[in-house]
Image (tube, rainbow, N blue to C red):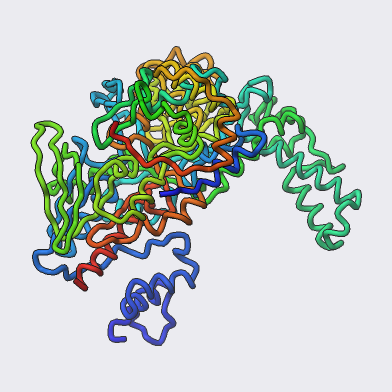
Amino acid sequence: MTDFPSPDFLAPPTRRQLLTMIGKVGGTAALYQAMTVLGHAAESQFNGPPKLSGARPGASVLVLGSGLAGMLAAYELTKAGYKVQILEFQGRTGGRNYSVRGGDTIAELGSTQTVGFAPGNYLNPGPWRIPYHHRTVLHYCKELGVELEHFAQLNHNAFVHHKDAYGGKPQRYRDLYVDYKGHVAELLAKSLNAGALDTAVTADDKAKLLEAMKDWGVLDKSMAYTKGVKVGEQRGWDRPPGGGVNGAPIPGDVGSLSDTLSTKVWQQIGFYTEHVMQTTMFQPKGGMDHIGKAFAAKVGSLVRLNTHVTKIAQDDKGVTASWTDTKTGATGETRADWLVCTIPATVLGQLDIQVSDKKKAAIRALPYGNSVKIGLEMKRRFWETDYAIYGGHSFTDQDISLISYPTGNWFGDGPAVILGAYPFGIGAYKLAGMTPEKRIAAALDQGSVFHPAEYKAEFRSGATVAWSRMPWILGCCATWTEESREAHYQDLVSMEGRIVLAGEHCSYYGCWQEGALLSSLDAISRLHQRASAA
Amino acid sequence: MVRKHKVGLVALSGISLLAAATLADPGFAQDRPGPSGSNAEVADSGKQIFEEICQACHMPDAKGGGEAGARVPALAGNRNLANKDYPIIILLKGRGGMPWFTDILTKPQIAAVITYVRGHFNDYKDPVTVADIDRIGSTNPPVPDCNCGH
């Protein structure tokens, strides 16, 4: 207790002092345990960077793939004293941590685009938002000096569009949300007052529920959801409050129950209620690839680019990766004591890798979902100036699924990039099958439903990535089912001999960078344990 | 290696296959657009289904793409398609990076697109029927071993 942090040992320790003390005495695991008990940190499996000191002198690790999982492995293993090399298929590092800007080339199977965005503008074709509880990503952003800014997620003033609702006219999410709870509250109040729930709720709870429904649904004196000033205070106005003679606000009509239900707005409400979709959300300022670049600043010198691995072998003494240089055609082999393989399963399943049949089966049991993103650069921020929409998403039941308004540089002059499409599933296949030009045209057609006067008139340039056509991954991210998890997950993540796999596909946080990083930390911790015992 | 895909077979026995799709909503807590795109529909003719779904990966000429070791297989001139059970099994169960399509295609659509691919990009003119798909669904054969380099 000599380093008890409080100079006044008679005073009870503050929570921070207590945690510091526990951390010093019991180590990170004890600290995490204590934090959990005290109500912190229970939302992430991250409990600090690994303490991997004391690699055997000369011990080496080969990392395949320089996405976030691979570069984090290299970063931490290097710190632990391992000699690390990374082989990368692409001519760039970062993997799916990727941003495209003016002048960049997007090479898909079958097409090449040159991005025409104005300076400062970008599209994040892959990951684009970081939930507040993805503590691993946030930790390394802080450690590596990546500047984060707010990512606007929920925007009440953005739209919801269903072609079979409101005659196909998009509605503000705010209006639908208020109408939805108003109608539900009215119906529940009616049921309660009719005695329909008397066997299910006590008289005391019934009284409280009626009060709750009146408040929550903004019901009138007769417990109905109707047009009025109180509803206007949530739903907005036909004439908003002002000053002077005409200062009094005029509320608008509320939507009918049938119209409200036809928008299926409960789906959006549910979406924003999910843990990974809740606010607060973050993004790296200026593009998601600043995370990859920050890792590359640490381990980029260890990377051999344009190196297509063709075979992975192991024996008692080490691992060997055979490769072809995709620029020169030269072939070579790289040897090391241990191997961390982050190659996506779509490609790894096609390689000759010396692991058990069980692990091969696991690799080949992982289909990848498809997704498409389309960035539409507009000449001006009409969604801000003309619609008062600052960030957030407008949803549609068309193939594009949504459009998302940029966070950052709000109120700025000059061109800005809207995310004009982000579908999975059918919409993504349909768009991915088009040429980039047709994809962009389709996104302009469909997105016009939200901003008909401006969308095509203000369009300046577009860029798109269809993940199924990116030659280095051939898909977006791994698709697990409960059945495939049960049959294959442990076989996929197990360390076999000198080889361990890592990446989002080796996690329960699929399609998130958090999953890639947590998987990598787990993989290298086990690798270090085995290397230390060897 | 026999791989069980209960998902595909359960979905096949259902009445509507155009339901909330595993692939539109593919997994635990993953990033995704949200609950939209729900009216995205696939056409019924084999040619249109190929254009709306298959060519996203296999390309408009059905010749696939990529390079050895990182390749989307060609469907054109593909001798594996001589046996019509082969593509049926793969559409019902997926293989390698390719998912099963029982979540987004109906049985008639699966039959139509296989008939089109076998007949148009190859010379196998015998049609695939819903009865063929039901036969595969009930006998549940293993997924053929991955031979992606052809």
A62 versus A21 height, above or below: above
Q: Can residue A275 be seen in this view?
A: yes
Q: Name the residue: 30% across, 61% down.
A: A495
Count of number-bearing discs = 0
* Residue at image coords 68%, 20%: A167
Report whether A173 appears left or right of A409.
right
Quarter of the image holding residue A501? Answer: bottom left
Q: Nearer the viewer, residue A150 or A341?
A: A341
Tell which of A256 and B27 is nearer to you. Answer: B27
Residue A125 placement (x, y as % from top left): 36, 33
**Residue that extends furthest to the right in the rendered view of this protein:** A194
Q: Is residue B97 above or below residue A448?
A: below
Left or right? Give the position of A165 relative to A278: right
Residue A144 appearing in the image: no
Examine the rendered structure and indicate whether residue A119 appears above or below residue A291: above
Q: In this view, does A247 lie to the left or right of A83?
A: right
The C terminus of chain B sits in image quarter: top left
Residue ID at (11%, 47%) = A333
Front position in the image: B50 or A276? B50
In the rendered image of this protein, does residue A498 appear above or below residue A400? below
Image coordinates of residue A519 in percent, x first then y, are 34, 56
Residue depicted at 37% across the width and 57% down the height: A491
Q: Position of residue A367 (x, y in %)?
A: 42, 41
Q: Which of A215 and A246 is in front in this view?
A: A215
